[in-house]
Amino acid sequence: MPAFTATAPGKIILFGEHAVVYGQPAIAVPVMQARARATITPNIRGNAGAVRILAPDIGLDKMLDELDSAHALVAAIEGVTNALGVTRIPACTLKVSSSIPVASGLGSGAAVSVAVIRALAGYLGKPLPNEQISTLAYEVEKIHHGTPSGIDNTVITFAQPVNFKRELPSPRGRGAGSEGIIETFHIAKPFTIIIADTGISSPTKETVGDVRGGWQAEAARYERLFAAIGSITRAARQAIESGHPERLGPLMNENHELLGEMRVSSPELDRLVQAARAAGALGAKLSGGGRGGNMITLVDAENAETISAALRGAGAVRTILTCVGD
């Protein structure tokens, strides 16, 4: 068998984080400038089933059977073998690397899962369709996030801007399941986003769990917040499809305030949001789980470097400039 390599992009949520878990729409786009990579190289001298896992970014170098059964990489690999009916993988080395910051809202876990699933299926000579890759990656997402929305694995697998809305079977079942309506949509006019990293890791699983606890304790208040974010997300999609991305700025500002009411912002995120607005950004908000990770800001391309510098001066450890729809 020849070596096989697969990659997957990062992602950012433009609108709808947290509310998407409770049946509201969310909009997410891929970030091609940050990627996860999985390369599988055969070991012709090894015995079947001997799979070495190398992940230099996290200092991992172990055989597959030495890892805990609940490890995300184990789950991704077993998902593929179960789907393909493979009992023993030909001896090989799986090397995983990523330029996507961990626990920062850029979908690092989902990107690694998608890259590994795609690479292993390709290595075994049985490539999987995107729909099945996304489903398998969602199962791994449960390890990372507990109650994932399904948006990370979706936008990363398909590498396209998507509008995602979960289908909830009943109010009692909220927060469970991965079924949803996935729609790609037309971006009538490209727009520029800066992603700024606080440098603070914030596992999405924790914030998702805290929001769920808040919803259980104050259902009516949280339902109002979720509904307001849903309205903002629908307005944002209309602005994108009609070629008026400048309208996204005020919507970002409003969305950030609502997320703050959910207690998922942080002083560091608020400081970056304020710095972006003061430097001339059209709007800014946190992106992803919150309490760290990334914020995003809508900018005019000619002001991008000035705003990036202001964000770094306000504490951002890195900034990524990305053009959506280019």
Image (spheres, grey):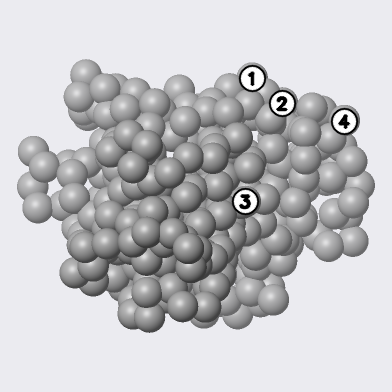
The residue indicated by pointer 4 is 313
Disc 3 is placed on an element classified as strand
- The structure residue drawn at horizontal position 56% and vertical position 53%, both measured from the top left corner, is 96
Q: CA distance from mark 1 to mark 2?
A: 6 Å
Q: Is residue 61 visible?
A: yes
Q: CA distance from mark 3 to mark 2?
A: 28 Å
Q: Nearer the viewer, residue 161 or 246?
A: 161
Q: Position of residue 53 (x, y in %)?
A: 49, 48
Q: CA distance from mark 1 to mark 3?
A: 28 Å
Does 15 sit left or right of 86 as displayed? right
Indicate the quadrant where residue 57 lies.
Answer: top right
Q: CA distance from mark 4 to mark 3?
A: 26 Å
Q: Amino acid at mark 2?
A: Arg
Task: Say which quadrant the C terminus sits in.
Answer: bottom right
Q: Nearer the viewer, residue 38 or 145?
A: 38
How dense is the environment of label 1, judged by Cα within 10 Å: few (below 14), some, or many (20 and up)? few
The residue indicated by pointer 2 is 271
Q: Amino acid at mark 1?
A: Pro
- The structure residue drawn at horizontal position 87% and vertical position 30%, both measured from the top left corner, is 313
Disc 4 is placed on an element classified as helix
Q: Nearer the viewer, mark 2 or mark 4?
A: 4
Q: Position of residue 77 (x, y in %)?
A: 34, 56
Q: Amino acid at mark 3?
A: Ser
Q: Amino acid at mark 4?
A: Gly
The residue indicated by pointer 1 is 267
Disc 1 is placed on an element classified as helix
The residue indicated by pointer 3 is 98
Q: Nearer the viewer, mark 3 or mark 2?
A: 3
Q: Nearer the viewer, mark 4 or mark 3?
A: 3
Q: Position of residue 181 (x, y in %)?
A: 27, 67
Residues under numbered marks 1 and 2 in contact, where contact means CB atoms less than 8 Å apart? yes
Q: Nearer the viewer, residue 212 or 53?
A: 53
